[in-house]
Image (spheres, rainbow, N blue to C red):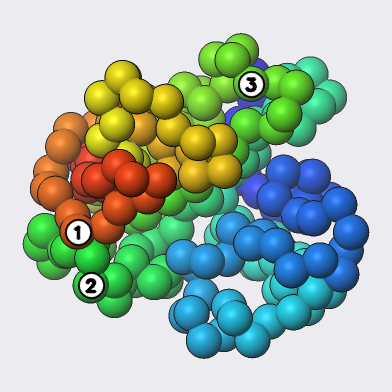
Amino acid sequence: MEIRPASNFDDVRTLVGPKRPDANVCWCLSYRIPSKQNLAMRGLERGEFVRDLCSRQTAPGVLAYDGGDVVGWAAVAPRADTTFARNRKIPHIDDQPVWSLWCVRVRPGFRKRGIAAPLIAGAVDFARDHGAPVIEAYPVDNGNDRVNMTMAYVGTRKMFEQAGFEKAADTTSVIDGFPRIIMRRAL
């Protein structure tokens, strides 16, 4: 498994883009840009916005490769550059310049192969390499209950505990009926 910065737009599109380029899918922008901008952006404009993100000096996340196949995506960025900077349901614990890790996605056909763990580790390394003192994730605290695949992108408490994160706080955010928590890892 190789983890690389997400600077290849075609590979990012494979993981988070739509089957039809004009479709209005997330493109992993929901937490990256203000809600008003996210709702106003339509079809091809969404992909072009992500293309621009991929061309910037700091990539919008990391990608996992298994051989020549792109198999996973993790969105990671400074919290100040995301909607988590202003999110009323997910509190700030302190004033550290935290990086946020909010989406972990493994391609269908490659799931259940242990890709999420190196993907999270790669996101942690990416944040550390860019000077982050701490990284946060906002997974669901689902116990042993199954999480709907549509909402599984946020990850689970167990997944992040296995990656060395610790629970730092509760939130008032809920996804798929499960409470979200703040998990942190000092870098």
Whether residue 127 sits left or right of residue 64 in the image: it is left
Amino acid under label 3? Arg
Rendering coords of residue 178 (x, y %): 30, 42
Name the secondary structure under disc 3: loop
Rendering coords of residue 127 (x, y %): 41, 47
Whether residue 1 sits left or right of residue 175 in the image: it is right
Rendering coords of residue 61 (x, y %): 56, 50
Mark 3 burial class by Cα count in 10 Å: few <14, some 14-19, many 20+: few
**Circle on res. 172:** 1
Whether residue 77 sits left or right of residue 63 in the image: it is left
Separation of marks 3 and 1 at Cα, in angstroms: 29 Å
Specify which label sits upstream in the sequence, 2 or 1. 2
* Residue occupying the point 42% across, 25% down: 146
Amino acid under label 2? Arg
Are dots 2 and 1 in contact, CB under 8 Å? yes
Quadrant hosting residue 81: bottom left
Name the secondary structure under disc 2: loop
Rendered position, 24 above or below 174: below
Residue to which mark 3 is pinned: 111
User: Exactly how many numbered labels are in the figure?
Assistant: 3
Rendered position, 157 above or below 139: above
Rendering coords of residue 76 (x, y %): 47, 52
* Residue occupying the point 86% across, 52% down: 19
Residue to which mark 2 is pinned: 88
Out of 130 and 141, give the one closest to the viewer. 141
Rendered position, 156 above or below 29: above
Specify which label sits upstream in the sequence, 3 or 1. 3
* Residue occupying the point 27% across, 47% down: 180
Nearer the observer: mark 2 or 1; the answer is: 1
Separation of marks 2 and 1 at Cα, in angstroms: 8 Å
